[in-house]
Amino acid sequence: MVTDRISSLVGPPGDGFHPTVSIVSVNYNGLKYLRPFLESLRALDYPSKCYHVVLVDNASADGSPDIVRAEFPEVSIVSAPGNLGFAGGCNLGIRISKSDYVALVNNDTVVDRMWLRPLVEVAESDRRIGLVGSKMLFLTPFLDLGLEAVTTDPDPVDSETRVPALLLHEARVIGCDYDKVVFRAGRFSMGTDSAGKPVHVLGSSARLAVPVAHGRSAATLLLKFGAAPPRDVLTFRIMIGDSEVERVKVTREPSTVRLDLSDETVERVSRNMINNAGTRIDGEGRFGDRGIWEFDQGQYDLVSDMPALCGASMLLRRTMLDRLGGFDTRYFMYFEDVDLSWRASQDGWRLVYTPDSRLHHVHSGSSQEGSPLWIFYVTRNHLFWLIKHGARRAAASAVGAFYLRALRAASRRFLRPQAPALVRDTVDVQVARSLTRHLAGLLLSRFQPPESGGRGRWTSVATTR
């Protein structure tokens, strides 16, 4: 079914026994993610009559809506008039859908077969539960890799200092195209080589997590590295898990090492890594993904109340949405889930995390982490949240410090117009402009929450139901 009319409600017919769920996902040029994502939703362990997928397309230009129409005819496509962002796209999907619950899930994920059922079961256990969140893992398992200097060298490396020891140019498993190497310890900084490719400066003992393809098959690990100046020669050992698998001597000239790992080794040392197991938050504006970058060892395997949940996988009770509205569309993307979580908790709703609902996430699939676009929204939206909900002192301090920083950035650009503009300075000036434009409305929202019935100007999910 294809619809462009927000007055045309779509939803599952139901079976009279199970709650109905509209699964809403926002797509913006996400063709490379959609097939595995939608195939995983097809395979859910939940009655097919009781859930329905709504894909909100934010004016994609990659042909993805046509592919979905042809290969996944059961999916309802809602065509947005332009790029509404994650917040606006989700609100449109909520508005067009008709069901007991709405499940929001990113299109750059692959859900487990049992992803939906635990979310519904937790929500059904208490009518005060307004939101339920999942355990979100990164897309593939990771190899636990260690690089350790051998201290028997004539010129040993002092592990207690921050003296560079190694320059790492590459670390990947051949055949795994998930580009998400995680530095867990021992990385000092990152630069680039003559070709503009990243080079990581490591100490004498570093720990990495390197993505490996799903499954238990053998793998080939490729490492390219060299000794960091002023050192000319360095011997170090390569650790997989707790076991040494190779000892290598390198010079300043980068060299490449290939390690063939058996299927038994891959199965033994590869682990899932947590992206989000609930979200930490407080009124001072400190929040983040609980458990991020940790290997999943069952440390977050209890159903528990949380102060906030991640919008990349979240079940919402329809009656809560009808009362509070949806996301604040001023955020566009990032922190809108923390905003809704805070508003729901202040209204008396419970927010619950369940580890029994699991999915795998590419992470920053639409906006590359660390890009100017990413920096803009993360910087600006953190300030948005503080102005709306944070402690007054924390909000005033953060906003004042930011404007001072932006003023310095603008001054540098004015005084040295011919000098190359720093990315951070450019972004800060852009954030300052946007923040100033929204400041009065944000202050009003702090003291006057959205009107009841989900009809607030920025959060409306109201329909003619």
Image: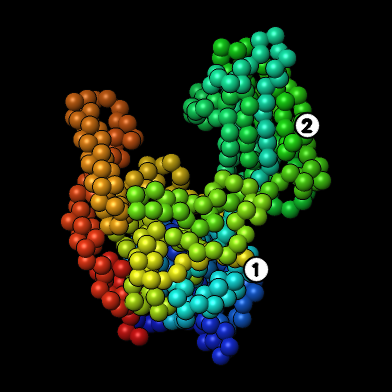
Q: Where is residue 72 in the image (x, y as percent from the top left)?
A: 56, 72
Q: Quadrant of residue 385?
A: bottom left
- Residue 277 appears in which quarter of the rendering? bottom right
| CA separation in Å, label 1 and label 2 | 36 Å
Colour basis: rainbow
Residue topped by disc 1? 113
**410 and 74: which one is in front?**
410
Q: Nearer the viewer, residue 47 or 301?
A: 301
Looking at the image, residue 235 lies above or below residue 125:
above
* Residue at mark 2: 245
Q: Residue at x 56, y 45 (%)?
A: 293
Horizontal and vertical percent position of residue 61: 42, 58
- Residue type at the position of mark 1: Arg
Which of the 4 quarters of the picture holds residue 18?
A: bottom right
Q: Is residue 3 visible to us here?
A: no
Q: Which comes sooner in the sequence, label 1 or label 2?
A: 1
Q: Is residue 309 visible?
A: yes
| Point 55% across, 50% down: residue | 291
Three-letter amino acid code of the residue under disc 2: Val
Q: Which residue is drawn at 58% across and 33% down?
A: 185
Left or right, residue 52 beside residue 86 = right
Circles 1 and 2, Cβ within 8 Å, touching? The answer is no
Number of numbered tags placed on the structure image:
2
Q: Where is residue 398 in the image (x, y as percent from the top left)?
A: 28, 43
Q: At which x and y percent is residue 278?
A: 51, 58
Kindly give the residue lying farthest to the top in the view shown.
Answer: 154
